[in-house]
Amino acid sequence: MDTGTFRGIITFLLIIAFLGITWWAYSRRRKPDFDEAAQLPFAEDDAQPNRDSSASPRSSSEQDGNGDSRTNKGDRNA
């Protein structure tokens, strides 16, 4: 099997995969799901967005300067 034959087989398989994905995306069974997904940006969301727990306020030990490396600047024994 030479390189040209191998490339031809790969090209054929990729064309088949492309046609399969295209058929899946445009099938009538998928249309309601895609229509619903298309309307998501316009849906009103009454709930507040969840905040990341890493964005919560710092603990009291970090506020004192004991645990926050950004405020702990060297030896304070002097």
Image: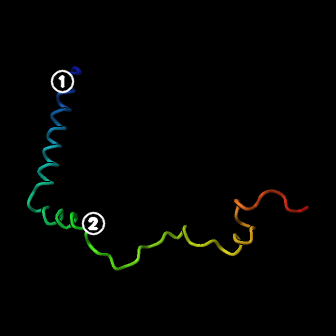
Kindly identify the residue that appears in the image at 69 percent across and 75 percent down. 60
Kindly identify the residue that appears in the image at 21 percent across and 63 percent down. 38
Q: Which mark is residue 41?
A: 2
Q: Which residue lies furthest to the top in this view?
A: 2
Q: How crowded is mark 1: few (under 14 residues within 10 Å), some or many (20 or more)?
A: few
At label 1, which amino acid type do we have? Answer: Thr
Q: How crowded is mark 2: few (under 14 residues within 10 Å), some or many (20 or more)?
A: few
Residue 23 percent across, percent down from the top left = 11, 50
64 sits to left or right of 34 = right
Kindly identify the residue that appears in the image at 19 percent across and 38 percent down. 14
6 sits to left or right of 73 = left
Task: Determine the secondary structure under disc 1.
Answer: helix
Nearest the eye: 73 or 24: 73
Front position among marks 2 and 1:
2
Kindly identify the residue that appears in the image at 13 percent across and 44 percent down. 19
- Placement of the N terminus among the 4 image quadrants: top left
| Colouring mode (rainbow / by chain / secondary structure / one colour) | rainbow
Q: Which residue lies furthest to the bottom in this view?
A: 46
Task: Determine the secondary structure under disc 2.
Answer: helix
Q: Which one is earlier in the sequence, the residue at label 2 or at label 1?
A: 1
Give the Cα separation between the discs numbered 2 and 1: 47 Å
At label 2, which amino acid type do we have? Answer: Pro
Residue 16's image quarter?
A: top left
Residue 75 percent across, percent down from the top left = 84, 58
Reading the image, the residue beneath label 1 is: 5
- Placement of the C terminus among the 4 image quadrants: bottom right
State whether residue 75 is above or below residue 17: below
State whether residue 43 is above or below residue 28: below
Nearest the eye: 62 or 29: 62
